[in-house]
Structures are given as structure tokens and as C-alpha cells.
Amino acid sequence: MNLATQNGVATFDLHAYLEARTKQVNGFFEQWMASRSEGVLAQAIRHLLLPGGKRFRPVLAIAAAEAVGGRAEQALPIAAAVELIHTYSLIHDDLPCMDDDDERRGQPTVHVAYGEAIAVLAGDALQAMAFEVLTRRHEDVSIEALLATAHDLARAAGDLNLVGGQADDILFGADDVDAARLESVHRRKTAALIAVAIVGGARLAGADVLTLQRLQRFGECMGLAFQIADDLLDETSEEVCSSVRVLGVAAARARCEELLAQAFDEIAELGECGAALRALAEFAVRRER
């Protein structure tokens, strides 16, 4: 359970948990990419995918599977698929026609390193790979669960959520964004993909419908809080859809804590089994970088 003892009280060792699960996810991707073709496109894909970032979304999927009595291996299909979608979205977000960023995770962005056309194609390939890895036959996972999870991921990644939220983020002017519109963008751009990772991990591990509904609400609340926390870490951002710009620092922090409390309420019935999810949610909202 990754429980440590502090002053005689059992606490969850989030650092050890993140280290172990991140290593597991990275091992999966290294093996997966070793089987792919070589060439410039493959190099561009690996450029951001390997070694990758914190693997926060895949670890959430695994934690959800374990919270409902499943194994990490059962959650790996959606864990990997969500990270592939997330990586594609970062490559495209960095493009000159989007956010026009030159650096990501301490290295040149993909379009700077390999050119804009290859960066677009790398993102396209990653999106397709997400559904390839998710829909393969997996031991101990039902076909019905895989199909439902693939459907949810497609909705989370498409025009109704991730892409639609990005479009609004681009099209909204400073005078267009109020608290409701801001939250709508954040729910679609960030929270939807986080929620589908959590629900997908639990579904592939055999969770019942009521538990999936609670985890959906948990993921939505935590995902929205995660994005607000991101905005708070960059208080000087001039982006139109910034929580700090729209709400102010104090109100944004208060909203984060409100959402975190709501998220905790949704998984209270999981008891000790939900320790990893609670620790990850708290980390997401209260992290310092």
C-alpha cells in the first residue's frame, strides 16, 4: 500500500508510489517504441514521449484500478493511451500556429527540433497510436470494457472536449471570458482527459457502475483543480483563459480547495483503498511546481 509511518501515524508514501508506477509506465513505452519503425518521424515521436514528464495521468489510471481491487497491468492500456493523447496535444499546442513555444521539458519543442511538418505528423501518429494500444487484446480485460473505454477516450480527445476546448481558448478574446466560460474551457481541455484516465483504469479493472460514476465526478473535480493550480503557478501569465486573470489569486486558490474537498467526498467510500488517489489529488492541487 506504500504506507509509511510518521509520528506513529500511517501515511501514504506518494514519492515511492510515483517512482514505482512511473518506472512501470516508462518501461511500457520503451518496449512499445522499440517495436516501431525507425526514421525521422519515429525520432520526433520519441523526442517528447521518451523519457516524458511526470506521467501523472497514467499513474492516476493505475491508482484507480488498484483502488477498486485491480492490478496495475489491467490499467496500462488506458494509462498508455491517455499519455499518448496528452503528448500529441502538447506537440500541437507548441506549434507556431498555436502557442508558438520553443522549449518543452527543458529541451527544444518537436517543431523546433524536427520542423513544423514533422511535428504535425508526429502528433497525428501519436493520436492514432493511442487507440492502437488501447484496442489490442489484453489479458484479464473484457472486450466490452475496452470498447467503452475507447469510446470515452475518443469523446475526451475530440471536438466536445480537448480539441473543442482548445478552439475556444484560441478564439475567446479577453472580454469574452468570465468564470463560467473559463471553467468550461478547463473542464474540456484538462479535466476530461484526467477523468477518462481514472474511470478507464477502474473500468478495465472491473469496477461497478456506481463506483465509475463517483470516479467520474472525482476526476472532473480534481482535473479542474489541477488546471487552476497550474494557472496559480504562473501568476504572471497573460493568457486569456487563465484562472488568475479571470478570478484573481485568492478566489482561484479558494476554488482549488473547494474542488479538492468535493473530489475527496466522491471517493470517501473507497477508504484506505483510495489512498493513492487522494494523495495524487492533493499533490495536483497543492504542488509548488
Image: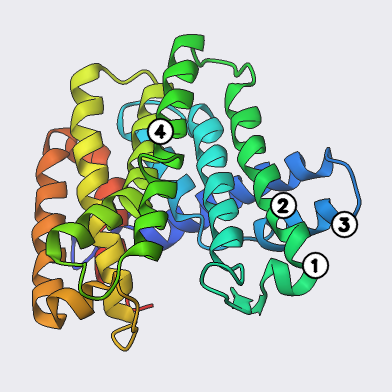
Residue visible at 11% across and 65% down in the picture: 255
Q: Residues within 10 Å of mark 3 (few under 14, many from 20)?
A: few
Q: Are marks 1 and 3 in contact (CB under 8 Å)?
A: yes
Of the numbered discs in the image, which one, if any, rests on residue 40? 3
**If you read the primary sequence from the N terminus, does the residue marked by circle 3 or circle 4 appear first?**
3
Q: Which residue is mark 1?
A: 114
In depth, the one of 102 and 132 nearer the eye is 102
Of the numbered discs in the image, which one, if any, rests on residue 155? 4
Q: Which residue is mark 2?
A: 122
CA separation in Å, label 3 and label 4: 30 Å
- The quarter of the picture where the C terminus appears is bottom left
| 256 sits left or right of 116 in the view | left
**SS at badge 2:** helix
Q: How is the image coloured?
A: rainbow
Q: Residues within 10 Å of mark 1 (few under 14, many from 20)?
A: some
**SS at badge 1:** helix
Q: Are marks 2 and 1 in contact (CB under 8 Å)?
A: yes
Q: Residues within 10 Å of mark 4 (few under 14, many from 20)?
A: some
**If you read the primary sequence from the N terminus, does the residue marked by circle 4 or circle 2 appear first?**
2
| 75 sits left or right of 6 in the view | right
Residue 114 in picture, x, y percent from top left: 80, 67
Residue type for callout 2: Ala
Compared to residue 284, the image places residue 60 above or below, namely above
Residue 97 seen anywhere in this rendered image of the structure? yes
Residue 280 in picture, x, y percent from top left: 32, 55
- The quarter of the picture where the N terminus appears is top left
